[in-house]
Image (spheres, rainbow, N blue to C red):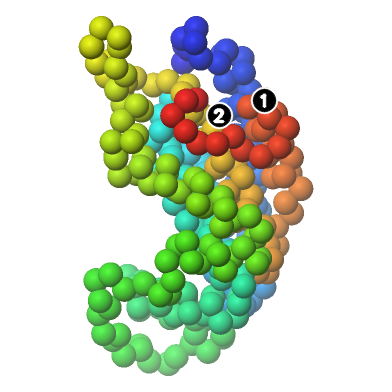
């Protein structure tokens, strides 16, 4: 990708992408080696979220490398939601993990009862059909922000982070007018320029936040009983920040990249 004079140098851009790819490699390494976790419902749920986080981070990395960071922020929104959910589950892991899995079981395409398998109590007969759930039914009555407030006990700072970043990411996901500067630029002469070509804009803030959220999710998965060595992923987070020119913490998500 050839960058404009007003954007970061190609060298810095490549450094940032390399750091992001290192984070992806660490997480794929866990899965390639065979993910190990305690035979408990919380650990199993944690492993599912760890796998999903790995796939999402890889997708974010691919989009950022292609110059579509704004589109990657829709996936980042999903990653943030998952981190909040797993943080909330961590507050009462035995109960809430079972609540989550019990809700999801009837939504499986197959008739496999994952909860029964985990408890090594596989039924001899196919379970009776479960009545169809209401269209907008959720596994918990709490909103995402309410979950974040409770999750803050297990993941300090996540509620504040959500309050700050989620509205911006939601604007990206829904295409609200407040995100219009990502798609069009107004010039002093009154003309409008369509912004549709690949660009390095917001690659730094997107990757930095994605790696941090992936690490947060991995920390919660580990706390729930998934066997993860976080050392290398923590180092890649520091490397991503360094590539962004920051000592710690991801830069804020906004309209300028």
Which SS class for mark 1? loop
Q: Which residue is mark 2?
A: 204
Residue situated furthest right in the rendering: 231
Counting other residues with Cα less than 10 Å from the Cα at mark 1, is it few (<14), some (14-19), or many (20 or more)?
A: few
Q: Nearer the viewer, residue 72 or 62?
A: 72
- Residue 128 in the image: state x and y as whole percent: 31, 90
Counting other residues with Cα less than 10 Å from the Cα at mark 2, is it few (<14), some (14-19), or many (20 or more)?
A: many
Q: Name the residue at 72% across, 51% down.
A: 230
- Residue 241 in the image: state x and y as whole percent: 67, 33
Q: Is residue 20 above or below residue 158?
A: above
Q: Name the residue at 62% across, 18% down.
A: 12
Which SS class for mark 2? helix
Q: Is residue 42 above or below residue 248?
A: below
Real-space Cα distance between discs 2 and 1? 10 Å
Q: Is residue 20 left or right of residue 76?
A: right
Q: Name the residue at 49% across, 10% down.
A: 6
Q: Which residue is mark 1?
A: 245
Say whether marks 2 and 1 touch (CB < 8 Å). no
């Amino acid at each position: 990708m050839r960058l404009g004079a007003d954007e970061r140098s190609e060298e810095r851009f490549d450094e940032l992408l390399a750091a992001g790819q290192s984070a992806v490699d660490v997480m794929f390494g866990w899965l390639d080696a065979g993910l190990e976790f305690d035979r408990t419902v919380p650990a199993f749920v944690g492993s599912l979220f760890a796998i999903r986080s790995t796939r999402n981070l890889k997708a974010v990395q691919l989009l950022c490398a292609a110059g579509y960071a704004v589109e990657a922020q829709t996936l980042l929104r999903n990653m943030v939601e998952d981190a909040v959910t797993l943080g909330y589950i961590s507050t009462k892991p035995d109960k809430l993990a079972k609540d989550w899995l019990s809700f999801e079981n009837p939504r499986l395409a197959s008739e496999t009862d994952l909860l029964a398998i985990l408890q090594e109590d596989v039924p001899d007969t196919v379970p009776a059909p479960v009545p169809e759930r209401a269209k907008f039914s959720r596994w918990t009555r709490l909103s995402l922000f309410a979950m974040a407030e409770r999750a803050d006990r297990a993941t300090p700072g996540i509620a504040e982070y959500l309050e700050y970043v989620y509205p911006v990411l939601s604007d990206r996901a829904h295409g609200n007018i407040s995100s219009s500067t990502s798609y069009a630029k107004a010039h002093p002469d009154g003309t409008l320029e369509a912004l549709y070509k690949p660009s390095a804009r917001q690659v730094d803030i997107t990757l930095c936040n994605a790696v941090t959220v992936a690490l947060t999710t991995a920390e919660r998965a580990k706390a729930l009983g998934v066997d993860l060595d976080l050392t290398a992923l923590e180092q890649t987070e520091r490397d991503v920040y360094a590539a962004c020119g920051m000592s710690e913490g991801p830069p804020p998500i906004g309209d300028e990249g």
